[in-house]
Amino acid sequence: MKDFNEKVSSAPSYILAVETSCDETSVAVVKDGREVLSNLISSQIETHKAFGGVVPEVASRKHVEVITLMLEQAIEQSGIRPRDLSAIAVTQGPGLVGALLVGIVAAKTMAMALGKPLIGTHHIAGHIYANRLTHELQYPAMALVVSGGHTELVHMESEGKFKLIGRTRDDAVGEAYDKVARALGCPYPGGPHVDRMAAEAEQAVPLPRVWLEADSYDFSLSGLKSAVLNVLNQAKMRGETLEPSAVARGFQEAVVEVLVEKAVRAVREYGSRQLLLCGGVAANRGLRSALQERCAKEGLELLIPPMEYCTDNAAMIGAAAYLKWQRGEISEFDAKADPGLSLEAWSVQSL
């Protein structure tokens, strides 16, 4: 292990990363886990819009159609010769199993053809370490992960060590946003539409805050989603017209208040030096502004990735994979797609 670490620290490391966990195909080349040399993303939003959500089989087929060309273009744009790559990283989980398989097969093929190590990488670790592409991280740190499939509070005592202290017990934030957006008549993906409507609203429809137990860091969104549907149905039964933007603002304020309060409380309890906002919903303007305002008031350092690193992308996978590469922790070539891959179990070993 010592010889390996001395080797990787003596020269730049170039990691080719592949991300196909859901409906974005992405390939990137990242230098030393921080410098993005290329980061290509092919979105499937227009394809899935017709279905009102992601269709797993369709997503897998779309990944197959573009992955080979994107691998070639990412390497070409990076200016790095294929033989100079240090390792091939790929999202191993969580995600849609068919979509993950496309990326894993492509990454294994590249690794075998070039004689390079393979690094199976955790998708959420990628979202967290997207912050490292533009910021210097300090430990211990707390990560608030908010995306279409995940809502979690993750404590990191040291680099690459993850401890899950809170998670959603039902819907993830992004999932709840899409369901509420559908009820309000917004097209897929609904989250950005709800965010925009909330920002434009002059009033907010009162909706409950779901705090759960007094000491809990878990979240619950299904009840709030049901409360929105009840408000809409009751208004319809009474023949009243509710302003959709007011409903959107009420919903967003209820979600954001709980996220912000629990995240700040977790930072205080665990003595975190930084709060990291991560995941696709980190692009939500209401959440970003509320966290920025609260953290400024509390004197807490808040890190938020640029918009291009909030949604699924391969650069974040390259950043997370570098944690493993530094320590010589590479994957076997029989590594399989794992939709239930544990973030805590993926944690790095100590140097």
Image: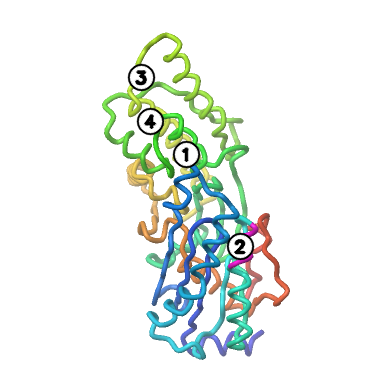
**Which mark is in front, 4 or 2?**
2
Q: Quadrant of residue 170?
A: top right
Residue hosting label 4: 248
> Callout 4: helix, strand or loop?
helix
Spatial separation of the CA atoms under disc 2 and disc 3: 42 Å
Check if mark 4's residue and mark 3's residue have beta carbons within 8 Å.
Answer: no
**Which sits earlier in the primary sequence, circle 1 or circle 3?**
1
224, 322: nearer the viewer: 224
Residue 189, quarter of picture: top left
Quarter that holds the N terminus: bottom right
- Furthest-right residue in this view: 334
Instruction: Kindly report the distance in space between the C-alpha atoms of the residues bearing marks 1 and 3.
Output: 19 Å
Q: Looking at the picture, tell me which residue is in the foreground, 96 or 294.
A: 96
Q: Which residue is mark 3?
A: 242
Residue 337 percent location from the top left of the image: 67, 63
Q: Amino acid at mark 2?
A: Leu
Question: Label 1, on which residue?
Answer: 178
- The secondary element bearing badge 3 is classed as loop
227 up-or-down from 276: above or below: above
Q: Identify the secondary structure beneath mark 1.
A: helix
Residue 351 sits in quarter: bottom right
Residue 76 among magenta residues: no
Q: Earlier in the sequence, mark 2 or mark 3?
A: 2
Q: Tell me the magenta residue range.
A: 97-102
98 magenta-colored: yes
| Residue 244 x/y as whole percent | 35, 26
